[in-house]
Image: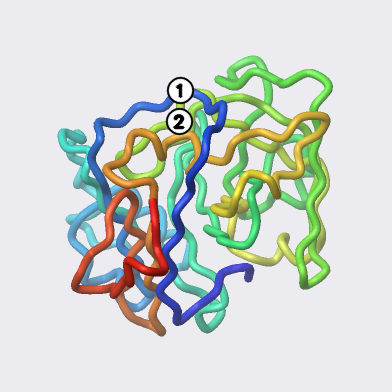
């Protein structure tokens, strides 16, 4: 709902920032973007594919039901982002603490928020939720809160936790995770479990102190402090982190600097 479609977007983040620790090795990685109808031809990312097929009511092949995800040995990663509602939003699997959720990557905001068990059960039905409780891996940032409103009138608010967040091959070990305690009705009927803002951190809504975004926390570990987005109508696209693929993008050195 918040994603800009049919565009190739290249973003460079420069300048100093006090960022949380991250785990990465000066490499780069890609997230493949697939439409729902293409998932049946996708042969990698077994765990993410099973989750996506199940969430969208598609049949899970017997071979895929038995197949376990191979251990990750290379930080160059491929992941799935499912397009829905006629490409109005794209959903990607993200590990938040110990919970796998499907998030809408949003270049127009800077908050990473998720459905949580602090919401009423009627609201979280059908969604994967970030569990706040005795088994939680996160630590609450005492006194911190957030509240975000989007251009379409939707919004959410809640509490803030520090936890591990994994996207593809990159890990932010102490990422600000915004656990929703209240969300607008628009999100209840959607398939997303929250949003990951990829905008500049100055737009982050956490109070009393803004927190770095996921991209800000990993960018020092990337080959280049950039990400590039190519989203196509009902076709494969990519999220590329740390590099610019010359087969996808043309960048003028007069208009782009690191």
Left or right of residue 86: residue 246: left
Q: Position of residue 25 (x, y in %)?
A: 25, 31
Give the total number of marks visible in the rendering. Answer: 2
Question: Residue at image x 68%, y 45%?
Answer: 202
* Mark 2 crowd level (few <14, some 14–19, many ≥20, 10 Å Cα): many
Tell which circle, 1 or 2, labels the residue nearer the N-terminal end. 1
Towards the viewer: 29 or 114: 29
Image quadrant assignment for residue 249: bottom left
Q: Position of residue 218 (x, y in %)?
A: 42, 36
Question: Residue at image x 30%, y 69%?
Answer: 39
Q: CA distance from mark 1 to mark 2?
A: 6 Å
Image quadrant assignment for residue 44: bottom left
Picture colour scheme: rainbow
Towards the viewer: 11 or 143: 11
The answer, for residue 111, to whether it is visible in the render is: yes
Residue at which label 1 appears? 21
Q: Position of residue 222 (x, y in %)?
A: 32, 40
Kindly identify which numbered label has been placed on residue 172.
2
Q: Secondary structure at mark 2?
A: strand
- Looking at the rendered image, the disc whose residue lies closer to the viewer, 1 or 2, is 1
Question: Residue at image x 74%, y 42%?
Answer: 180
The relative height of residue 255 versus residue 68 in the rendered view (above or below) is: below
Towards the viewer: 144 or 90: 144
Asked whether the residues under the numbered discs 1 and 2 touch, taking CB atoms below 8 Å apart as contact, a structural biologist would say yes
The relative height of residue 141 versus residue 228 in the rendered view (above or below) is: above
Q: Position of residue 17 (x, y in %)?
A: 55, 32
């Amino acid at each position: 709902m918040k994603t800009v479609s049919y565009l190739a977007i290249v973003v460079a983040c420069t300048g100093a920032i006090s960022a949380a620790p991250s785990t990465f090795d000066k490499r780069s990685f890609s997230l493949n973007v697939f439409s729902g109808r293409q998932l049946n031809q996708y042969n990698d990312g077994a765990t993410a594919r099973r989750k996506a097929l199940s969430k969208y009511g598609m049949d899970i092949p017997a071979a895929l039901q038995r197949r376990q995800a191979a251990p990750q040995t290379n930080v160059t990663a491929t992941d799935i982002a499912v397009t829905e509602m006629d490409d109005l939003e794209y959903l990607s699997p993200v590990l938040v603490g110990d919970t796998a959720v499907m998030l809408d990557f949003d270049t127009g905001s800077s908050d990473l928020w998720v459905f949580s068990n602090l919401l009423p059960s009627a609201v979280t039905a059908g969604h994967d939720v970030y569990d706040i409780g005795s088994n939680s891996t996160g630590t609450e940032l005492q006194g911190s809160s957030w509240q975000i409103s989007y251009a379409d009138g939707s919004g959410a608010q809640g509490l803030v936790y520090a936890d591990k967040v994994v996207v593809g091959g990159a890990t932010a070990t102490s990422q600000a995770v915004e656990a929703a305690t209240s969300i607008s009705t628009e999100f209840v009927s959607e398939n997303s479990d929250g949003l990951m803002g990829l905008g500049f951190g100055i737009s982050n809504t956490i109070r009393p102190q803004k927190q770095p975004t996921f991209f800000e926390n990993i960018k020092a570990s990337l080959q280049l402090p950039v990400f590039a987005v190519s989203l196509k109508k009902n076709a494969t696209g990519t999220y590329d982190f740390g590099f610019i693929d010359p087969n996808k993008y043309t960048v003028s050195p007069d208009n782009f600097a690191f």
